[in-house]
Amino acid sequence: MMWQYWIELYTRTFCGARGLSPKSIAAYAATLKQFREYARIVLDDKPPDRITTQDALRYLQHLRDDRMNGASAVNRTATVLRSFYRAMVAMGHLETRDNPMQGLPSIKATPQKQPGFLKIEEVERLLIAPPDDTIIGLRDRAMLVLFYGTGIRASECSHLREGDVDFDHGTVTVVGKGGHERTVPMNDAVVDAMLLYRHHRGPALPRAPFFRSRLGNGMSRGAIYQRVRYWGHRAKIRQRISPHRLRHTFATHLVHKGVNVVTIRDLLGHKQVTSTQIYFHSTAHDLREAANKHPISNLMETIEHLLPDVRLPFQYAPRGTGYG
């Protein structure tokens, strides 16, 4: 009973107070329930207040060796357990000295995988894939243009309402992770695609969903993913296409255009710049281009005439230095 009470207290009170999304809270709860099952089967049903650092270490090793979890998955579990026990200490259910995660050594972070993104020509093929002679085609094209042109998430798109789109000011207001609201500018191409769809779709009340299904209902996150994957397949793009890959593409193409990391962070709705820095990936071509732009080339041209056109002697070290 203590396990169930602590897990519910953590997810409903602690995670809820932090403003985490229902999806994140469910993922945290699933991680803790999995650890609770391990404690029940392997640790003779130990209650959470008797778990030791050695127990936690053995569990993480079990995930790595027996369940074949990758380093990222093991790190995520360790992070959830740290947060869980830290919350129990903060709520007064556990003494700091009894926190099993307090003495757990830090797990070496794994290099963050660079996100995949589309080339410009692939984006062009994708955006013209939906037909422009049906409302569904105009809707799907407007969604694709919105994802690539603003970098919003699929969940933000699925909750988009008519009143969230301001065509007069060229902005779209979305609610991101943790319930944080942000307003993202739309350029003219995005505005035109959205206006064209709305014109043929017809008027709607401010609280009505902006993107509608065939039956006139709002579109779920899963339905939006399915439509994006469908048009990626029709556009004959080899890599798997998703709203999140278009978000990566949006950010990466801004980097290539020289937009600074803080601006991209604000557009994406990241809390920390470190979350945005993964888009600043370099290629061999980028490195060669940077080397070629270095001012040393011009500098050498200006000092070349100062070098005497004579054979220079060797320069020996001063006497008595011990070098020869």
Image: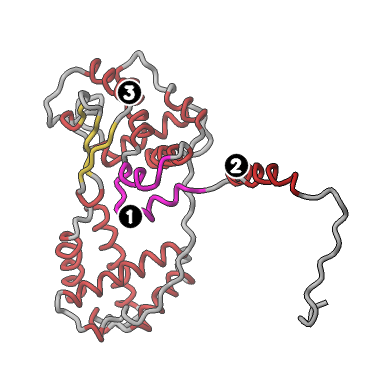
Query: How many other residues sit within 10 Å of disc 3, few (<14), some (14-19) or many (≥20)?
Result: few
Q: Which mark is residue 188?
A: 3
The answer to which image quadrant residue 49 occupies is bottom left
Q: Is residue 227 magenta?
A: no
Q: Which mark is residue 293?
A: 2
Query: How many other residues sit within 10 Å of disc 2, few (<14), some (14-19) or many (≥20)?
Result: few
The residue type indicated by label 1 comes to Gln
Question: At 27% across and 42% down in the image, what residue appears?
Answer: 155
Tell me, yes or no, if residue 212 can be seen here. no
Query: How many other residues sit within 10 Å of disc 1, few (<14), some (14-19) or many (≥20)?
Result: few
Of tags 2 and 3, the one toward the viewer is 2
Foreground residue among 238 and 44? 238
Relative horizontal placement of residue 60, taking residue 119 as reference (left or right) = left
Foreground residue among 73 and 197? 197
**In the picture shown, does residue 97 fall above or below 234?**
below
Mark 1 and mark 3: Cα distance apart in space: 29 Å
**In the picture shown, does residue 42 fall above or below 303?**
below
Question: At 17% across and 66% down in the image, what residue appears?
Answer: 8
Question: At 60% across and 46% down in the image, what residue appears?
Answer: 287
Question: At 37% across and 38% down in the image, what residue appears?
Answer: 243
Comes first in the chain, label 1 or label 3: 3
* Residue that carries the numbered disc 1 in the rendered image: 272
Mark 2 and mark 3: Cα distance apart in space: 33 Å
Comes first in the chain, label 1 or label 2: 1
Image coordinates of residue 227 in percent, x first then y, are 36, 31
The region drawn magenta spans: 259-281
Image coordinates of residue 224 in percent, x first then y, are 32, 35
The residue type indicated by label 2 comes to Lys
Q: Main secondary structure of the magenta part?
A: helix
The residue type indicated by label 3 comes to Asp
Image coordinates of residue 22 in percent, x first then y, are 22, 53
